[in-house]
Image (cartoon, grey):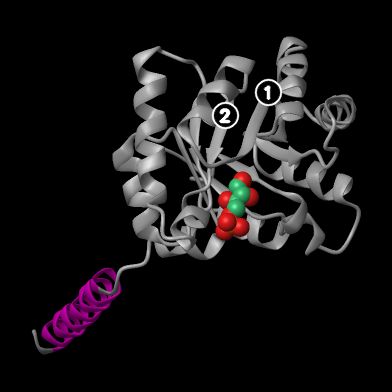
Amino acid sequence: MKIFLDTASLKEIREAAALGVVDGITTNPSLLAKEAGDPEQILLEICRTVDGPISAEVVATDAEGMVREGRHWASLHENIVVKCPCIPEGLKATKVLAGEGHRVNMTLIFSPTQALLAAKAGASFVSPFVGRLDDISTPGMELVHDIVQIFDNYSLGCEVLAASLRHPMHVVEAAKAGAHVGTMPVGVFHGLLKHPLTDIGLRRFLDDWEKAKKELAAKAVEG
Ligand code: E4P
């Protein structure tokens, strides 16, 4: 499963990308609004930092406006994927943008039928929001399972991007469901690697090594 970070923070992105396992970035208007500076420059810098799909979302709600904004985002850098909301105007815009060769990530997906229509319109990614469904007592991961199964049944070349992942177990479950991508906040990303037994084990190895070196040195002096 590809790992995307769900953030527009360059500091967070640089630190996490340095680990060498980040495949792409998803942003949205809320995430970009949290950052100081020109959103266009931020997106460009993200594209220079991570060589993979970088989602930039349109804010127009009519197809014409979405296409205009989408073309503009796509013109900024080849890594940009245009994010369109899953509404009727978003489907129309996706059809046009995909027809022009632009990649589209259809966002705010909350049902398998929305995902099916997004794929038929030519989206390259669909983003089911797992955490937001969990928030309203609806099992979000079942949606990921359903979409993966439907796309597999018809060999649809659209990737399932499990979004709104809130903790490491969401990432595990998304991978088990066969999602092609999981996008997550950096806190969740770092949580994927952390294990207290790894830290304890490493400490013990290093301590034992130091002890053995001292014993060897002492023997050399004696002998
Ligand atoms: C995905 O592209 C969205 O930006 C994101 O995953 C939403 O996550 P949230 O529900 O935690 O805000």
Q: Is residue 76 left or right of residue 200?
A: right
Tell me which amino acid carries mark 1.
Answer: Arg
Image position, residue 37 (x, y; %):
89, 59
Q: Quadrant of the N terminus?
A: top left
- Residue, x 72% and y 34% (percent of image)? 84
In magenta, the rendered stretch is: 197-221
Specify few, some or many for label 1: CA neighbours under 10 Å numbering under 14, 14-19, or 20 or more: many
Vertical comparison of 23 with 119: above or below: below
Q: Which residue bears the numbered disc 1?
A: 103
Question: Which image quarter: residue 143?
Answer: top left
Question: Which image quarter: residue 149?
Answer: top left
Q: Which residue bears the numbered disc 2?
A: 125
CB at disc 1 and ligand 1 closer than 8 Å: no
Image position, residue 20 (x, y; %):
51, 46
- Residue, x 62% and y 16% (percent of image)? 122
- Residue, x 75% and y 40% (percent of image)? 56
